[in-house]
Image (tube, helix red, strand yellow):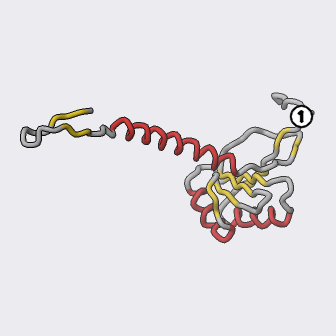
Amino acid sequence: MAVSTPSSGGGMFWEINITPLTDIFLVLLIIFMVTASVVVESATHVNLPQAENTSPENKGVIVTYTANHELFVNSKDVPEEDLEPALAEALGRVDAKIVIFQGDRTVLLGDMVKILDVAKAAGADQIAIAAQRTATASAPTGS
C-alpha cells in the first residue's frame, strides 16, 4: 500500500499491514491447541482386557496404567511417587469415592495390586477394573 509522506520529502514509502498475518497466526494457534489436547488423550492408549459382563460407568476417578508403566489420573500424567496425593486430590473433587482402574492387559498383577493399595490409602471407598466387552457377550437384560 503506497502512502505519500509529508510535504517535506515528497517521496513514497511502503507500509505492510500485519493485521491479516496476525489473524492467521491466531487461528493456527487455536487449531494447534485443540489438536494438542486430542493427541495427549490418544497418547494414553491402553489395551483393556476382555470381559463378557461389563457395565458402562464413568463415575469417579480414572487411573490409567499403560504397558510402558506410565500412570495417569484422569488423563493427567502422574509420577508413581506422587500417585497417592494426586488420587487424594482427585477423589476430593468427586462425590463418589470410586477409583476406576484402566490397566493394559500386559500389566502384571503385582503392579495392579500396588496401585489399588495406594488408591485405598488415598481414600477410595470402591475400586472398579475397566474392561472391554467381548464381541460374543450378549446385551445385559433388564432384571
Q: Looking at this view, is 87 or 73 the one in front?
A: 73
Q: Residue at x 72, y 61 (%)?
A: 70
Helix, strand or loop at disc 1?
Answer: loop
How many discs appear? 1
Q: Whole-percent x and y of residue 69? A: 76, 63
Q: Where is 110 relative to 28, above or below? A: below
20 vs 136, left or right, is left
Q: Whole-percent x and y of residue 132? A: 82, 42
Quarter placement of the N terminus: top left
Q: Where is 112 relative to 51, above or below? A: below
The residue under label 1 is which amino acid type? Ala
Q: Residue at x 68, y 43 (%)?
A: 58
| Residue 97 lies in quadrant | bottom right
Q: Whole-percent x and y of residue 84? A: 65, 66
Direction right: furthest residue: 136
Q: Residue at x 64, y 46 (%)?
A: 39
Quarter placement of the C terminus: top right
| Residue 139 lies in quadrant | top right
Q: Whole-percent x and y of residue 81? A: 66, 71
**How many residues crowd around disc 1 within 10 Å: few (fewer than 14), some, or many (20 or more)?**
few
Q: Looking at this view, is 140 or 72 the one in front?
A: 72
115 vs 78, left or right, is right
Direction left: furthest residue: 8
Q: Residue at x 78, y 48 (%)?
A: 130
Direction bottom: furthest residue: 81
Residue at mark 1: 135
Q: Looking at this view, is 44 or 80 the one in front?
A: 44
